[in-house]
Image: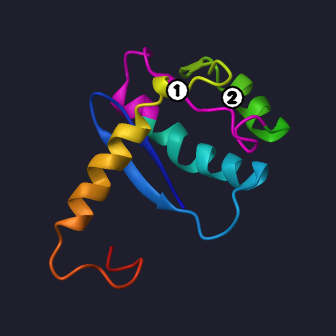
């Protein structure tokens, strides 16, 4: 699995998650990657963070962290059962099409 942060202004790093994503692992990703990305890309303070209602995203750890850093960016609350609002699906499809065009195809996750 991978995690990414993107903005209409820029793309963040693609983070490879080697194990099951738990609340504390997700918190580590937020603090290590989201917190450094948003102020650079949205120095005007207008950045908004959107995530779905996956269990790690709504964990006690993540919720507390997002509240603690709410002055740095706005957390867009995701309505339940609303997958059509998620732009990541379009990005994922574009990425899959780009990977399918690679010749020779990547053999390992590191090649990818």
The quarter of the rendered structure image containing the N terminus is: bottom right
- Check the image and name the residue furthest to the right: 60
What secondary structure prevails in the magenta region? loop
The colour scheme used here is rainbow
Q: Is residue 10 above or below residue 14?
A: above
Specify the segment rendered in magenta. 38-58
The answer to which of marks 2 and 1 sits earlier in the sequence is 1
Mark 2 Cα shell of 10 Å, populated few (<14), some (14-19), many (≥20):
many
The residue that disc 2 covers is: 66
Image location (x, y in percent) of residue 80: 68, 22
Asked whether 86 or 40 is in front, the reply is: 86
Image location (x, y in percent) of residue 10: 28, 36
Residue 106 position by quadrant: bottom left
Q: Are marks 2 and 1 in contact (CB under 8 Å)?
A: yes
Image location (x, y in percent) of residue 65: 73, 33
- Secondary structure, mark 2, is helix
Image location (x, y in percent) of residue 85: 47, 23
Q: Is residue 69 above or below residue 109?
A: above
The circle on residue 33 is none
The quarter of the rendered structure image containing the C terminus is: bottom left
Q: Residue at x 39, y 83 (%)?
A: 108
Mark 1 Cα shell of 10 Å, populated few (<14), some (14-19), many (≥20):
some
Magenta span has 47?
A: yes
Q: Residue at x 58, y 23 (%)?
A: 82
The residue that disc 1 covers is: 49
Q: Is residue 89 above or below residue 95?
A: above
Asked whether 76 or 104 is in front, the reply is: 104
């Amino acid at each position: 699995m991978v995690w990414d942060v993107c903005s209409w202004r820029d793309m963040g790093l693609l983070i490879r998650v080697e194990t099951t994503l738990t609340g504390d692992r997700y918190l580590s990703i937020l603090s290590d990657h989201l917190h450094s990305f948003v102020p650079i890309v949205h120095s005007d303070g207008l950045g908004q963070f959107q995530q779905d209602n996956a269990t790690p995203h709504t964990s006690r750890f993540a919720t507390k962290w997002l509240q603690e850093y709410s002055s740095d960016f706005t957390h867009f609350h995701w309505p339940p059962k609303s997958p059509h609002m998620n732009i990541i699906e379009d990005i994922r499809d574009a990425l899959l099409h780009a990977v399918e065009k690679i010749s020779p195809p990547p053999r390992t996750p590191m090649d990818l």
